Amino acid sequence: MCLSLAALAATCAWIWQLVQHGDTKLLVAALPALLACAGAASVRWIGPAQLRWDGQLWHLVEDARRSAAACSGSLAAVFDGGGWMLLRLRHEGGAGLRGTWLALSRSDMPAHWHALRCAVYSPRPAPAGPSAQASADPPA
């Protein structure tokens, strides 16, 4: 987090110097750098956490001593590099529009890597309830 804020401050200082010296040609390169640094600084960094599947939802527990999940929702693989994965946990009920991004690697959890990949790619169970039990071809 501190490194992201330092990069944001350095980029702002660079843009300020470009404006002061009237060098507007480099502003084309500076503005995307500013946006990238601002995006990195806005990311909520979490420490070691536990990812759990209860059969319906994924739960991310940041502190293993707490029983309540910090956030729950659906998990999707955004990128799979074989030895590492970028996952997005979309929060249940739309809380936190950005969701939580998780970058996981085989070296982080060698004993559980295969089971995690199987769980991420397994089909989800159909939701229970009256709408799930309704006929696909209702009477006219």
Image (cartoon, rainbow, N blue to C red):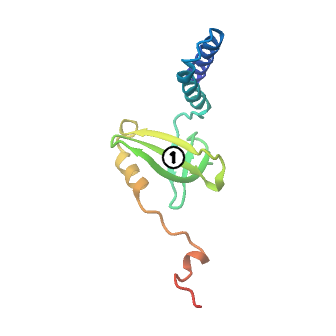
Amino acid type for the residue under numbered disc 1: Arg
Residue at horizontal 51 percent and vertical 35 percent from the top: 48
Query: Can you give x and y, in whole percent of width and height, for residue 73 in the image?
Result: 57, 53
Query: Can you give x and y, in whole percent of width and height, for residue 54 in the image?
Result: 52, 58
Residue at horizontal 51 percent and vertical 43 percent from the top: 50
Query: Can you give x and y, in whole percent of width and height, for residue 76 in the image?
Result: 48, 51
Q: Is residue 40 above or below residue 132?
A: above
Between residues 8 and 19, which one lies in front from this camera angle?
Answer: 19
Query: Can you give x and y, in whole percent of width and height, for residue 117 in the image?
Result: 38, 50
The quadrant of the picture occupied by the C terminus is bottom right
The quadrant of the picture occupied by the N terminus is top right
Q: Is residue 66 above or below residue 8?
A: below
How many numbered callouts?
1
Residue at horizontal 50 percent and vertical 50 percent from the top: 52
Between residues 84 and 31, which one lies in front from this camera angle?
Answer: 31
Q: Toward which corner of the image does residue 100 lie, by quadrant? A: top right
Q: Toward which corner of the image does residue 38 lie, by quadrant? A: top right
Density class for disc 1 (Cα within 10 Å; few <14, some 14-19, many ≥20) is: some
Between residues 106 and 98, which one lies in front from this camera angle?
Answer: 98
The residue under label 1 is 88
Q: Toward which corner of the image does residue 30 lie, by quadrant? A: top right
Q: Is residue 5 above or below residue 73?
A: above
Q: Indicate left or right for 103 with 13 as reference.
A: left
Q: Is residue 37 above or below residue 49?
A: above
